Image: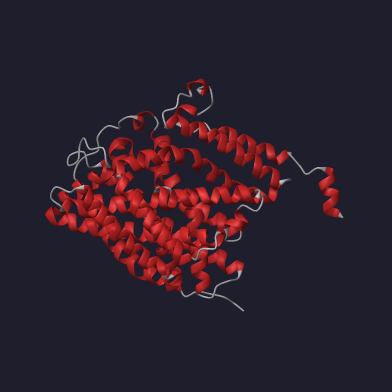
Amino acid sequence: MKQSLKLTDIIALGFMLFAFFLGAGNIIFPPLAGQLAGENLIPAMSGFLLTAVGLPLVTIIAIAVAGGTWGHLTKDLPKQAATIMAVLIFIIIGPAFAAPRTGLVAYEMAVKPFIIDAAQIDLTIFSIIFFAIAMGFAWTQGKLIDVIGKVLTPALFVGLIILAVAVFTNPQGAMIAAQGDYLTQPLTKGFLEGYNTMDTFGSLMFGMLIVDAMRSKGVTERAAVTKYLISAACIAAAGLAFVYISLFYLGATSAAVASGVDNGGVVLSLYVQALFGPSGQIVLSVIVMLACLTTAIGLISACSDYFSSLTPLSYKKWVIINGVACAIVANVGLAQLISLSVPVLFALYPVAIALVALTFIRKKLPNPQMAYRVVILVSLMFAMIDGAKVAGVDVSALNMLPLFDIGMGWLLPTVTAMVCMFFVGKSQQEELVEVA
């Protein structure tokens, strides 16, 4: 039987995936990066787009090519190693970093500006309400595509289009000279800045959530699932690219209205107020609240879905556990949460990149099982050194490593290991067993 989706459902799937991706990090990092990049806007933005759009898109395609599930993607790894990797990723994008960050950014940018003398208790109350709403939307798993893809995201996208048109037609200043690393290595700095969105981790899990949404619509055949998953990924990637280019340009032309700030959220807030006046904060609050809420819903749902498959606890119980954990962690504060997450991202992002790359070359590898084990281990070892450096650990003895000084010491060893695996075949005994 031929399985197909209506065009409106395909677009809704793409919007749903776009909404899951477009959250806190996607909004707060590009404006500041654009301001610091200044006249080096194009190379810096290109590097950012590689990790913040290109990698998530390629990751979703890898999931589709592999078969649509984490199990298919990691079938050549030891089961325990694959499970540990998945649990770590879900903890990072769930209750530890990404999900609580959505609540924090929503509070800092959409609510706090309206509160005189905001205190910790205000954040606590808001985080409880915010994550209670997110839990409510995530509660009914099968209706995610209708609620998010057809209702929340179109409203979010309209707000973003209004902002983008205003930014390009009425920029608030001229570009200034690039600063810091954006002056000497804008492409690499933009590439590493894209880590902060956590979207490659998210895409490893959101891809499976989209597969579940398709199955709820009756699409179960692998070929159909692959086709629609790639279609949804392309729609989401186009939306993300549109948002990032707008926000980078906003940041690059923001020096006159937001100079000297150290937070992309503040850059965006001051710029929008300059564009739209006092009512600009209301426009921004609606955009930020919708963006953060849809991402929180997706993260809580994805984490709960996975953890319920590992434990006796049901999906709905995990929704409660994850939602409560997010509300608690959100009270740490935005700056502290970002500083804690960066070393972890530097340590684990290269592993996700290596896993995705292996998916596309798997059929050409003589011994996929050995290749996956060796390449993932090499990427993890060298990425942990990069992570230690970012965390402030003295690893200067390893400065001789290629690209180590720019935070990408993992790249050459990982690529070398991958190339070597093309020349490592199966043992004769293994081949005899297969023939038998």
The chosen color scheme is: secondary structure
- Of 425 and 212, nearer the camera is 212
Q: How many marks?
A: 0
| Residue 196 found in image quarter | top left
Residue 184 position in % (x across, y down) = 37, 28
Which quarter of the image is occupied by the C terminus?
Answer: bottom right
Q: In the image, what residue occupies the spot 43% across and 43% down?
A: 195
Location of residue 112 with respect to 16 vertically, above or below: above
Q: In the image, what residue occupies the spot 55% across and 73% down?
A: 219
Residue 341 position in % (x across, y down) = 40, 41
Q: In the image, what residue occupies the spot 84% across and 51% down?
A: 433
- Of 175 and 224, nearer the camera is 224
Which quarter of the image is occupied by the N terminus?
Answer: bottom right
Horizontal relation, residue 140 to residue 376: left or right: left
- Of 37 and 299, nearer the camera is 299
- Of 51 and 146, nearer the camera is 146
Location of residue 430 with respect to 392 vertically, above or below: below
Residue that extends furthest to the top in the rendered view of this protein: 397
Residue 169 seen in render? no
Residue 202 seen in render? yes
Residue 248 position in % (x across, y down) = 31, 45
Residue 10 position in % (x across, y down) = 46, 69
Q: In the image, what residue occupies the spot 47% across and 60% down?
A: 304
Horizontal relation, residue 320 to residue 410: left or right: left
Residue that extends furthest to the front in the rendered view of this protein: 312
